[in-house]
Amino acid sequence: MTDTITTNYTRADFQTDQEVRWCPGCGDYTILAAVQTFMADLGLPKEQMVFVSGIGCSSRFPYYMNTYGLHSIHGRAPAIASGIAVARPDLSVWVVTGDGDALSIGGNHLIHALRRNMNLKILLFNNQIYGLTKGQYSPTSEKGKRTKSSPAGSPDAPFNPVSLALGAEATFVARTIDMDRKHTVEVLQAAHEHKGTSFIEVYQNCNVFNDKAFIELTGKETRLENRINLEHGQPVIFGPEGENAVVLEDGAARIVPTDSVAAGDILVHDAHAPDPSAAFALSRLSHGPYGPTPIGVFRDVARSTYEQDVKQQLVDAQEQKGAGDLSKLIRSMGAWTVE
């Protein structure tokens, strides 16, 4: 199979006979609908798609996608998906994970998948809580978060997933919101077109254990003044009337009134910049969905994939030395006879 094969699907073709078992009102429903709609419009055969998940509410995702899929083990979805991607580069491989699954027990698997630049698409649902296990604070929960297991408040400083991905040299990094299906589909499309590891943080509301965590970005009265929509090639201006702008000063991003600076001083977003410094500075404008928060594609750069590099190594080895001798390799460092 190749990307040239196209088919005509509707969202219903990607729905399964499994009962969707999330809490009523969970943001996962909206994300599922967006992904199913996107996959239908993509036109690839369902048999060419694979969804791999770990453990958590988000990780039930493969049950609800009528594609190949695997509900794997806690935190290890990127590792398992990496094996699939290397063995079958013709497949479209997607990882669905959560802030607890990916950033706690799965932290190392995530960062190494990002740095290796395998052809994976990673969706990290961030609800800033452990929902499946009934509401403990997670690696992205704000400091001081009070839960049943942290009645005095969380003492931990939270991860910023976008900053983490950029620091791991990810070639595609984006953020979207569960309630904005149009924006989510646009980001999914950009991630699919990217060759290499695509990382998308999805702000996802847990209406049972962490309701309205993202209200500043979704509420009618606050979303326009707080959403910083990143568009490649466009100046970073936001607010109901475009009254706020972002500038770079000594490498740090800062928000200023638009009319207080010259137009040429406003940061023009360059998602394709080889140096991730500006994208990282943008990611540091917020450490969670509080106040002005960048949404969209932070980085989208070209770099050879892990699969391409390994394949080239094999080609080079054949051209330089001919066929290898496995027996000679095994004995090259000495051998022992056990009697």
Image (tube, grey):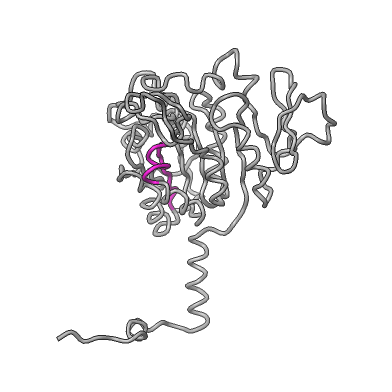
Instruction: Give percent across and percent down for residue 221.
Output: 60, 12
Image location (x, y in percent) of residue 50:
38, 45
Q: Quadrant of the C terminus?
A: bottom left
In the foreground, 283 or 240: 283
| Residue lying at the far front of the rendered structure | 152
241 relative position to 213: left or right:
right
Residue lying at 46% horizontally and 39% vertically, measured from the top left? 123
Residue 125 % position (x, y): 44, 34
Please check the rendered image and state whether residue 105 is part of the magenta-colored stretch, yes or no: yes
**Quarter holding residue 270:** top right
* Farthest top residue in view: 221
Magenta-drawn stretch contains 207: no
Residue 252 vertical position relative to residue 338 in the rendered view, above or below: above
Please report the bounds of the magenta region as a residue range: 91-106
Residue 120: x percent and y percent?
Answer: 47, 49
Residue name at image x 39 percent, y 42 percent? 104
In this rendering, the count of numbered labels is 0
**Left or right of 302 in this view: 179:** left
In the image, what residue occupies the spot 42% across and 30% down?
154
